[in-house]
């Protein structure tokens, strides 16, 4: 393969990983389990803290798939925000 064609392939497909299509049903189920989305009344600092908890949970799952402690922390924090602001975490279900 000549160099021009290889450069064109790299420009069109910089990563060779396939694009993952999300399943809306599974996404909705995960949101229910984690009590997401957060209430609209939350402050930016509370949202930032929830995002950090979610990132740490994601990193813990990447290391050990059976480790659900991070997801439990996200769920507990989101539930505490829902109770603080008096919203329903199931949002219409």
Image (cartoon, rainbow, N blue to C red):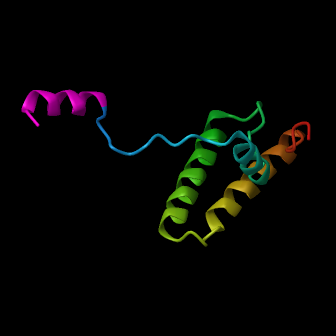
Residue at the extreme left of the image, as rendered: 2
Q: Quadrant of the N terminus?
A: top left
Q: Position of residue 86 (x, y in %)?
A: 90, 40
Q: Position of residue 26 (x, y in %)?
A: 71, 48
Q: Position of residue 53 (x, y in %)?
A: 59, 53
**Residue 10 part of the magenta segment:** yes
In the displayed structure image, the side of residue 92 where residue 79 appears, left or right: left
Q: Residue drawn at (10%, 27%), measured in percent from left and top?
A: 4
Q: Quadrant of residue 75?
A: bottom right
Give above or below for 89 relative to 53: above
In the displayed structure image, the side of residue 56 where residue 28 appears, left or right: right
In the displayed structure image, the side of residue 74 where residue 79 appears, left or right: right
In the displayed structure image, the side of residue 12 where residue 42 appears, left or right: right
Q: Residue drawn at (59%, 51%), measured in percent from left and top?
A: 54
Give above or below for 6 relative to 90: above
Q: Residue drawn at (64%, 68%), measured in percent from left and top?
A: 69
**Residue 42 part of the magenta segment:** no
Q: Quadrant of the C terminus?
A: top right
Q: Main secondary structure of the magenta part?
A: helix
Q: Position of residue 47 (x, y in %)?
A: 64, 39
Q: Residue drawn at (32%, 41%), measured in percent from left and top?
A: 15
| Span highlighted in magenta in the image | 1-12
- Tally of numbered tags: 0
Give above or below for 7 relative to 47: above
């Amino acid at each position: 393969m000549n160099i021009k064609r290889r450069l064109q392939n790299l420009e069109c497909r910089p990563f060779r990983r396939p694009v993952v299509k999300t399943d809306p049903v599974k996404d909705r189920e995960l949101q229910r389990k984690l009590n997401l989305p957060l209430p609209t009344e939350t402050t930016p600092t509370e949202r930032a803290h929830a995002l950090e908890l979610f990132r740490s949970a994601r990193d813990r799952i990447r290391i050990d798939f059976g480790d659900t402690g991070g997801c439990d922390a996200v769920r507990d924090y989101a539930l505490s925000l829902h109770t603080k602001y008096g919203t329903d975490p199931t949002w219409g279900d």
